[in-house]
Image (cartoon, rainbow, N blue to C red):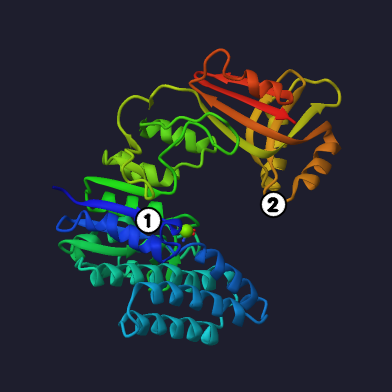
Amino acid sequence: MGLKIYKFGGASVRDAAGVRNVAAIIERCAGEELYVVVSAMGKMTNAFEALLEKYMQSSDYESDMQYVQRFHLEICEELFPSHHAVFAELERYFVQIENLLEQNRSQSYSFVYDQLVVFGELLSTTIVSQYLAWAGVENTWLDAREIIRTSADYREGKVDWALTCSNLQQVRAEGMCVIQGFIGSDENYFSTTLGREGSDYTGAILAYCLDAESLTIWKDVAGVLNADPRYFEETHLLQKISYEEAIELAYYGASIIHPKTLQPLQRKKIPLYVRSFEREELPGSVITEGAAIEPLVPCFIVKKGQTVVRVATKDFSFIDEEILQKIFDNLSKNKLKVNLMQISAISVLLCVEDKYSLLATALKDFEENFVVQKYGSCSLYTIRHGAANSAEQIERSGEVLIHQQNGNTLQLVIQA
Ligand code: ASP
Ligand code: MG
């Protein structure tokens, strides 16, 4: 049997019961070659972010520090006898964190972020690895900072694939390994991170470099659904999805797997399983080569918080390349993300996302040269593989401002 990669996110190890459950899943692979990627426990990355916020503002962060320490200690108190070596290891990390914050002189938020936040993953993997060993599952704990090498773009390290792959070939430990997701290091061995939710990506990097047989991402959902259950009553599990389809769905805003995770897997045709850590008996979904989706049902994706801006020429001149260039210069200057656009003779409809609260500035700029109308609180719906009547209910939910069909993708912008 070939090597497998398992990735467990924060929700799977949010408490002692979670760690026991994860260990039980892993135990079933005892004797096999398995790399286990683990994220920070529960919401610990957010907790470190909150601590950092205060630290950078020179506010008192003692209570945040206490919170992080207590959180891990309490989990360990439930899992281990009081004399267990894991407590000394936790203490060692706590001291490292305190030293880091005392000795740091850098003002760079992103740099300090990466030096600090990695402790979430270091702590979680230490606990999981020790718990496995204590439960009789032999394993090797690996430090991802010695393996996953990246650029010095803190908070969004770009992977040095050649170096990372050669590191992985060298350490290639037999049996079971436990390693942190999300983290790496730059050429000076300063810690780096791969962007929020980056542990899935770590799983893909390992799978790619080690020519793994498969990557399994264990989640708190049954698999990949055709629609977000928060917005749609009826949902179906997608048993099979092609890499291309998964990338498309992610592009339109489905919160499945980040495209960055899919590309390395696609290149080596490594299947990605998405399974429930709460209900191991369920088959889950697999992203692999083949047909777009099975079963072939319409997929619904919603992006809330959109604004539609209609930009029309003042003198009724036609929209041409020069005008479009002007429009896009303004959009890019104000970091507005255009999710959909429709051009007609004398106007352009733009469905934009105002991520950096710069829309008002952009509108002022537009008003100098154009007639501008703004429609707030819109939602962008994307339907893939829809039937003739798939959009009916959505269309009734408000005023349809944009309706665009492109092959098997229908997009609607609705003002509620
Ligand atoms: N712990 C990191 C985060 O919460 C990475 C991950 O969970 O994938 O973003
Ligand atoms: Mg996480």
Where residue 34 sits, quadrant-wise, is bottom left
Alpha carbon distance from label 1 to label 2: 32 Å
Q: Assign a secondary structure to mark 2.
A: loop
Q: Is residue 247 left or right of residue 310?
A: left
349 over 77 or under it: above or below: above
Residue 77 place in picture, x, y as percent: 40, 77
Structural crowding at the residue carrying mark 2, measured as other residues with C-alpha within 10 Å and reported as few (<14), some (14–19) or many (≥20): few
Query: 148 or 12, which is in the foreground?
Result: 12
Give the position of the C terminus as an image quadrant. top right
Disc 2 marks a residue whose amino acid type is: Tyr
Can you give x and y, in whole percent of width and height, for residue 310 in the image?
Answer: 77, 29
- 401 vs 268, nearest the viewer: 401
> Given this view, does label 1 or label 2 mark the residue nearer the observer?
1
Q: Secondary structure at mark 1?
A: strand
Mark yes or no: residue 150 visible.
Answer: no
Q: Is mark 1 within 8 Å of ligand 1?
A: no
Q: Disc number at residue 356?
A: 2
Residue drawn at point x = 60 percent, y = 25 percent: 411
Point 29% across, 72% down: residue: 130
Q: Nearer the viewer, residue 339 or 322?
A: 339
**Residue 11 seen from this side:** yes
Check the image and report above or below for 280 versus 134. Answer: above
The residue sitting at the top extreme is: 388
Residue 15: % across, % down: 44, 65
Precedes in sequence: disc 1 or disc 2: 1
In the rendered structure, which amino acid carries the disc numbered 1? Phe
- Above or below residue 37? Residue 207 is above
Residue 256 appears at what percent x and percent y? Answer: 46, 41
**Can you identify the residue that label 1 sits on?**
8
